[in-house]
Image (spheres, rainbow, N blue to C red):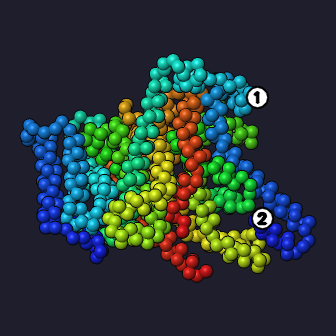
Amino acid sequence: MSKVRNKNARGSVSAGRRALGQGLMIAAGVGLAAVVLMQALHAGGIIPVGFSNWRPTLYAYLLWAVAIGAGQVLMRGEAGQRALFLLPAVMFTVALVIFPTLFGLYIAFSDWNLSAFEEHHFNGLDNIRFLLKDEYFWNALGNMVWYMLSVFFQYGIAFGLALLLNAEIRARKFFRVVFLLPFMLSPVAVSWMIGKSLMDYRFGPAAKLARLLGWESPAFFTAPWIARLSIMAMDAWVSIPFIMILLLAGLQALPKEVLEAAKVDGASIWQSFTQMTFPLMLPVSVTAIVLRMIFQLKLADIVINVTAGGPGGATDTVSSFIYREYRDRSNVGYGTMLAEVYLIMIIIFMTGLMSVANRWVQKYTTES
Amino acid sequence: MTTNSAARRREHGHTGFHRTKHAVGRFVIYSLLLFWTFVSLFPVYWTISTSFKTAVNVTQGHLLPWVHFEPDWKGWRSLGLSPDTIFSTSTVREEFLKRFGNSIMTSLGAASLAVVLGSLAAYGLSRFQYKFGWMRNKDISFFFVSQLILPPVVVALPFLVLYKELALLDSRLGLILVYALTVMPIVIWIMRDQFNTIPRELDEAALVDGCTSWRAFTSIMLPIALPGMVAAFILACVLCWNEYFFAALLTSTDAKTLPVMVASQTGSQGISWWSMAALATAAIAPLTLVGIFLESYIVKGLTAGSVK
């Protein structure tokens, strides 16, 4: 499978050993194919012998994977041993990703509904046609734009916090642990802690504070924009520590001499920040923002548990919308089509974002 | 900021103005730090204190125990975890402990699996040149790390169907496999960085001495890379412990994890905040402890590979 091209890695392997390895791999392949074929025929109702479920094929795959690994070592000696470092992870990922992706494509082009009595069948481009007219999906996608933009806001606060933690302060470790804490908490628990109780209209302290400040009816989740901002605030509370930690590590890795030199030259704090610190932090910033955006595209837990997308879809993310399509409407075929389209959009967006970011960083760092 | 003004004070000599400026600067820094400490801790404090409130204290919005309200075990009693109920039987507690156990088993299981498979792959990718069809090391690494952008919704449903056929639905093993898949890119990302920082001469010397590559890995690399592996393991555990999406779709009765239990209670509990607060407290307690005592490992895991 994988060849190691390294001269001293090519150990001497006897012909008998090589034949043994080859035999083992072929036997395992035939065995796996036989189990799969038999189970497929059994599931199709063609032959009576077979297992009650597909679990045995999983074991057959495991055995096959072990046999392939052993075969590699037998056939190629040291080179095979080296391949053995990579093989388990590859086989694990391929088995768990390739199948669901391909199978997902099949589901996406069907009218599969788990609560329907009829069998599901292929319905061509119907799902896509429906998707193009589905206002809720486009609405959720539009919300995602706002959620993505909120990452920059999180980045701003996180940068401020990182600068604070990087200043000469006492009890730095204490503040670092406390600031990191929200990142550790489960978004589902946070949904209740903040969304359902702290921001509760009647008894929540946040509502009390808002009343004190003169907001007559502090309902955080009834007006569309306020609801969206509330969700963003909660999401920021959980996510800011992540960006902050990356930026703090970046600040600590900055060359001290350069910053000292700027001070000696009499640069003000603001000047040394905009002309030295910020440009030097650009690569770390881009990494942090890109990583954070990748996670932001999956945002769902808080929305599902606090607003379920409401009011009127104002807080919906694509993930939470598809989740409800599965959970509440059992609309498997259509939901999967939405997910696949979303994946394609993500891939295009991320590819574009990364190439723009790379070019930008390169330009900026070579100029200065 | 501080060294800046200190340096200038030394240079110019007229200290009075700069000393006040310095003091103002310190004041601003510490105020901001304390403000954010409040922002970070208040929701946690609110949850813990609410778990000791009775209905009156909730509706009146009392804040400080012993000052505004008398702490009560009500919330913990409803979970079966208060001092007077801890030794009697409680179905809620049994349910809670089962979910808690599921969360622990799936997090530890998935993190172990991902760290073992991911570390091996990361070591191979950092040391040897592979060729797999048209794919070289760079492409293989990209293949692994690119899994990170795959949103759970895309694979969730096919997994549902696949697991039904494999009889893995609503089982811990099924969750462990999915979770290992989702954290594997992060583990490989961290571990590749770790192995790249270890000098090649170390394992090359072992190979020259006639060790096989596996021998060199287990006896030389493993001890050096252990702190990195621990960091990856802890970060993976945190992510798995908090995972909700897959758990909500792929489990129903047996393998339900703690986040699913918390989520299902939020809707049904209504105003009985004390029991919800107790449940939320119990759900975040383990990770709060991890955050306090293993903070350096989490920081190490988060920053590996992204800060050069």
Residue A232 visible in rendering: no
Crowd class of label 1 (few under 14; some 14 to 19; many from 20; radius 10 Å): few
Crowd class of label 2 (few under 14; some 14 to 19; many from 20; radius 10 Å): some
Residue at the spot 90% in from the left edge and 68% down from the top edge = B15
Q: Secondary structure at mark 1?
A: loop
Which quadrant holds residue A42?
A: top left
Which quadrant holds residue B21?
A: bottom right
The correct choice, above or below, for B222 with respect to B13 in the image is above
Name the image quarter holding the N terminus of chain A. Answer: bottom left
The correct choice, above or below, for B300 with respect to A201 in the image is below
Q: Position of residue A106 (x, y in %)?
A: 25, 51
Q: Nearer the viewer, residue A193 or B280?
A: B280
Q: Nearer the viewer, residue A104 or A309?
A: A104
CA separation in Å, label 1 and label 2: 39 Å
Amino acid type for the residue under numbered disc 1: Val
Q: Is residue A176 left or right of residue A91?
A: right
**Number of disc labels:** 2
Residue at the spot 46% in from the left edge and 70% down from the top edge = B199
Which mark is on residue B2? 2
- The answer to whether marks 1 and 2 mark residues whose Cβ atoms lie closer than 8 Å is no
Q: Which residue is mark 1?
A: B67
Q: Secondary structure at mark 2?
A: helix
First in sequence: mark 1 or mark 2? 2
What subunit carries mark 2? B
Q: Is residue A19 left or right of residue B145?
A: left
